[in-house]
Image (cartoon, rainbow, N blue to C red):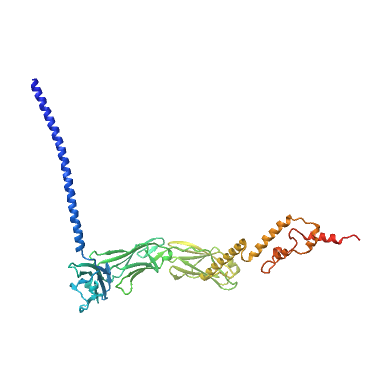
Amino acid sequence: MLQLRRGRVDLASRVNLTRYLLRDLWAVSAKLLDQLRNALRSWEDKGEGRRGAGNVRGDAATRPPIVDIEPKGQAVVRLGDSLRIMCTMGSPLQICRVEIHGESSMILRPNQSSDDGIEYYGEGTNKGQCGVHIFKVKEQHNGIFRCALTPEDRRVESNASVNIVVAKPPNNPELHTSLGHYGRYEYQKGQKLEISCSASGGRPAANVSLYLDDEPLGNDERPIIYEDPSMNEVSMAVQNASRSLDWTDNSKTLRCIANHIALDKPKESKMQLQVYYPPQPQPVIEHFGYVIGQKGTVNVTVYANPRPRFLWRVNGEKIEEGRPDESNRLETSTAVELGNGAWLVVLTIDSVQKSDTQKEYILEAHNKEGAYEYRIVLSTSPEPAGVDLDAGSIIGIVVGALVLILIVFLVIFARATGRWCFAARRRGDEEAAGGISAGSEAHITPADDEEEDEEDPRIIDEKIPQGGQENPIHASTEYVNGRTNDFKDTKKDEKTDTPV
């Protein structure tokens, strides 16, 4: 039994040892395989790099030169006009070939026959130029133009293209608006108006714009262009705008204008707006120059749409329009339409009296949009003369004010710094200040009689500055170097008062 057990233990140990050896062998084999795989990958990368470098050199050697074309992108031309397109290359050409939409492919050379209305254009193929001149553009030429250039030292063509657009005029523009409060074209003050101006059928799309009379609308929004991707017949340009209507917009005209290269003059669609609004407020209306005993008229212009009804109140007495008052001295007229919502109402006074200028005049106006009362004041005084300045007068006043301010500034500056005409005064002030300081420290004695009777030459210099003009500050000699006339008078009295 013991030997059997030992045999089992040895067998188990051998199995475990074999397992450990196989595991280590597998790990080493996997590591070797990874190293081998990395080595193969590195070798392949190096081979690809060598082949890629060879391909780059080969591509550089076989790549065709670049062709420059003018015009670029798109060439818009009217039907029947001429068109020139130039393709250039930096080396002499062996072949200059062009493809025009609707025409067969053709090889162009200088001095060829141009019976078909197409000829070579340029300074010569030896200078790398391959241009085409189409005498009269046809409808069939609308499409892609392509030029193919072959240089003398190669057999491969280089291409460039441009889109020829044969202009076609748009249809008449269409003007659309949002529905009004009272109808299609009848709106209310403050209502928001939505407007759309469109023009279809143009090639290329038309340039559309909106105006209210002469005021541009919708400049903050760019027109929307709808085009057929195939560049065929269908295209549409749309300009949208919005506006909050005011009473001043009444009777104005909306204008939708389409401009296009194929048009000799713009096409236009328009409509007139009707804006309804109440009678508009005004300040107190003053009338002057009435003469006692003579006929007088009171004119009032009211802005309202639709036409309002009018009623006068003179010191509380009501007078319907077109009727006289109870005394038959006052008579009103029927409102006269002046256009664009303006109405003229007239009150006639048979013979103006002093009391007429003291009455209260009120004109009531009301329509379905609202009402307002206008107050009128009459006076026998002449109308005050107003000051009406044009732009030139205003500019002159401003310039004059600026010049005056500059002069004042220069005077203050010269006075503060002692320049120009203030230079002599500044020197006199400085010398006077120095003299006062010295004189205040001097001791005056009676022995100075003879010196006091003689004028100091320095005093003369101070009195007459440079330029010969007397200095007003030192024009008097009452105080010079600390001496006064009172002191001189005392000295003189002492000399004359002697004993007999």
Instruction: Please give left or right for residue 69 compared with residue 413 in the image.
Output: left
- Work out whether residue 201 can be spotted: no
Q: In which quarter of the image is residue 268?
A: bottom left
- Work out whether residue 37 can be spotted: yes
Viewer-proximal residue among 227 and 181: 227
For image coordinates 13% across by 35% down, the residue present is 22
Q: Position of residue 111 (x, y in %)?
A: 22, 78
Q: Where is residue 246 in the image (x, y as percent from the top left)?
A: 42, 63
Viewer-proximal residue among 123 and 56: 56
Viewer-proximal residue among 431 and 475: 431
Of all residues, the one furthest to the top in this rendering is 1
Q: In which quarter of the image is residue 29?
A: top left
From the image, which quarter does the N terminus lie in? top left
Of all residues, the one furthest to the right in this rendering is 500
For image coordinates 21% across by 67% down, the residue present is 158
Q: Where is residue 473 in the image (x, y as percent from the top left)?
A: 70, 63
Instruction: Please give left or right for residue 435 compared with residue 244 in the image.
Output: right
The relative height of residue 164 versus residue 442 in the rendered view (above or below) is below
Instruction: Please give left or right for residue 385 compared with residue 245 in the image.
Output: right
From the image, which quarter does the C terminus lie in? bottom right
Q: In which quarter of the image is residue 162?
A: bottom left
Number of marks drawn: 0
